[in-house]
Image: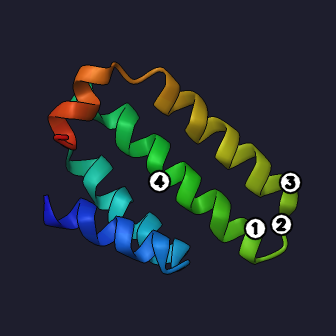
Amino acid sequence: MPELDLAVIEFNDQKFYDAHEILELLWQEAPQEERNFYQGLLQIAAGFYHLQQNNENGAKILIGEGIYRLKNTPIVIWTWIWPP
């Protein structure tokens, strides 16, 4: 999935806002069973963007929510979207 790969590249380049925008599009278009995965990733990207903007409280909230969503995403979804 090229869009997900691009989001990872943007995230790793610390372009968190751009990564969030890509992930939000993926989330909106994803089937219901994949939405938690994408929402978790986009919340983490948004959280890091807030950290760049010196909004520590917003960052903590969004990163925490994103981690919670990813922890509650079945592993089968992870391997389905992102094969090993």
Question: Do labels 2 and 1 touch, CB within 8 Å?
Answer: yes
For disc 2, the neighbor class at 10 Å (few under 14, some 14 to 19, many from 20) is: few
Q: Left or right: 68 with respect to 42?
A: right
Residue 79 location in percent, x, y? Answer: 21, 32
Q: Left or right: 27 with respect to 45?
A: left
Question: Do labels 2 and 3 touch, CB within 8 Å?
Answer: yes
For disc 1, the neighbor class at 10 Å (few under 14, some 14 to 19, many from 20) is: some
Visible residue check, residue 48: yes
- Given the image, on which type of amino acid does mark 3 rest? Asn
- Given the image, on which type of amino acid does mark 1 rest? Leu
Q: In which quarter of the image is residue 2?
A: bottom left
Which residue has dot 3 on it?
57
Height in image: 18 above or below 80? below
At 25% across and 65% down in the image, what residue appears?
5
Q: Nearer the viewer, residue 50 or 1?
A: 1
Q: Residue 51 carries which label?
A: 1
Q: Left or right: 67 with respect to 36?
A: right
Residue 75 location in percent, x, y? Answer: 31, 22
Dot 3: element:
helix
Question: Do labels 2 and 4 touch, CB within 8 Å?
Answer: no
Residue 50 location in percent, x, y? Answer: 72, 67
Quadrant (top left/top right/bottom left/bottom right) for the N terminus: bottom left
Residue 34 location in percent, x, y? Answer: 26, 33
- Given the image, on which type of amino acid does mark 2 rest? Asn
Which residue has dot 4 on it?
42
Nearest to N terminus: mark 2 or mark 4: 4
Q: Quadrant of residue 49?
A: bottom right
For disc 3, the neighbor class at 10 Å (few under 14, some 14 to 19, many from 20) is: few
